[in-house]
Image (cartoon, rainbow, N blue to C red):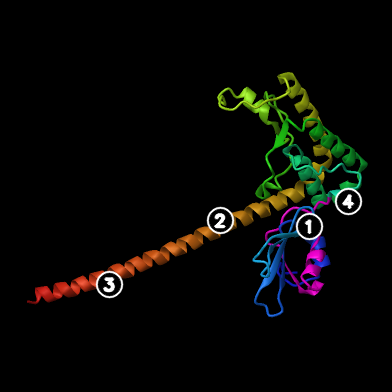
């Protein structure tokens, strides 16, 4: 199926990834409505010719479609910018999937979406469920201190790693960190001092708890998703690189046009000057 083919909305949503665009054209094809699929399965209408593109959120593609008076066959789907997987916390059966948007929960949300996409059989595993819920409990326990960098779409499929080292702040591949601990240890950051309720020993204990829970999840998940993630990461990076190359070509072509126009202009000036010179030298 082409990414822009008309298709049934129910089928499109079942296979859609966050970022997928849905379009409904008016009967005269002069204008259209556009909505984007969000991570929780809802959609945000970002283009509406009747309301000067006022944004409006709908619980599902079906409800948005009905509000715009279109049947399933009149919805066009563009999945070229979609990535990841839709996660509805209400149907995460037995998993304590967090509803909070705090940075402490970025990784547990990320790993759930990876499992759902690459190894959905684990959603029926009691072992994985227990390990996941343990990690969520620890994230909640250390909620005020724990943070993560928000996963970038371009690095979503980087392979999971576990690399124990002897470093002072050893996270063993887990992407969490304690921001206040960083500023406490880095003496050069004298302009910023964040309040923390943890002592240095408590930071080390908390990190050991999180890394141990991360290792349990890593041992369960990594063997099942490694090949899939490596392939998807390669595809993502090559697609990104090609996009960069294409933009460079476009910019270079524009510069070539500008250069050619400059050359033609200079040729005209030279021809005019030579004509004047010929007239002066013939006298």
**Contact check, label 4 and label 2, Cβ < 8 Å:** no
Q: Position of residue 141 (x, y in %)?
A: 81, 30
User: In the picture provided, is 199 more to the left or to the right than 255?
Assistant: right
What residue is shown with label 4?
91
Q: Earlier in the sequence, mark 1 or mark 4?
A: 1
User: In the picture provided, is 32 more to the left or to the right than 141?
Assistant: left
Q: Is residue 21 magenta?
A: no
Helix, strand or loop at label 2? It is helix
Q: Which residues are magenta?
A: 59-88
Viewer-nearest residue: 231 or 281:
281
Distance from the alpha carbon under mark 3 to that under mark 2: 36 Å
x 54%, y 60%: residue: 246
Distance from the alpha carbon under mark 1 to that under mark 2: 31 Å
| Foreground: disc 1 or disc 4 | 1
What residue is shown with label 2?
244
x 71%, y 57%: residue: 19
Helix, strand or loop at label 4? It is helix
Which circle marks residue 268 in the picture? 3
| Foreground: disc 4 or disc 2 | 4
| Foreground: disc 3 or disc 1 | 1
Distance from the alpha carbon under mark 3 to that under mark 4: 72 Å
Q: Classify 10 Å Cα crowding around label 1: few (below 14), some (14-19), many (20 and above).
A: many
Q: Quadrant of the C terminus?
A: bottom left
Distance from the alpha carbon under mark 4 to that under mark 2: 39 Å
């Amino acid at each position: 199926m082409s990414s822009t083919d008309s298709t049934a909305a129910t089928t499109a949503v079942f296979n859609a990834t966050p970022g997928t665009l849905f379009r409904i054209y008016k009967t005269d094809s002069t204008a259209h409505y556009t909505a984007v699929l969000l991570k929780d399965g809802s959609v945000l209408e970002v283009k509406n010719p009747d309301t000067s593109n006022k944004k409006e959120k709908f619980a599902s593609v079906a409800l948005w479609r009905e509000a715009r008076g279109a049947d399933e066959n009149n919805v066009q789907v563009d999945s070229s910018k979609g990535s990841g997987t839709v996660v509805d916390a209400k149907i995460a059966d037995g998993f304590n999937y967090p509803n909070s948007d705090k940075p402490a929960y970025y990784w547990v949300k990320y790993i759930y979406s990876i499992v759902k996409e690459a190894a959905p059989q684990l959603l029926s595993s009691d072992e994985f469920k227990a390990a996941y819920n343990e990690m969520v409990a620890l994230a909640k326990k250390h909620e005020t201190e724990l943070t993560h960098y928000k996963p970038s779409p371009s690095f979503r499929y980087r392979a999971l790693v576990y690399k124990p080292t002897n470093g002072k702040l050893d996270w063993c591949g887990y992407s969490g960190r304690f921001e206040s601990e960083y500023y406490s240890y880095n003496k050069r950051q004298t302009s910023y001092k964040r309040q923390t309720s943890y002592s240095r020993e408590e930071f080390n204990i908390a990190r050991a708890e999180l890394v141990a829970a991360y290792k349990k999840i890593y041992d369960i998940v990594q063997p099942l998703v490694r090949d899939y993630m490596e392939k998807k990461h390669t595809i993502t990076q090559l697609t990104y690189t090609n996009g960069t190359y294409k933009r460079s070509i476009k910019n270079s072509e524009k510069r070539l046009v500008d250069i050619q126009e400059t050359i033609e202009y200079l040729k005209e000036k030279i021809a005019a000057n030579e004509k004047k010179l010929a007239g002066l030298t013939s006298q």
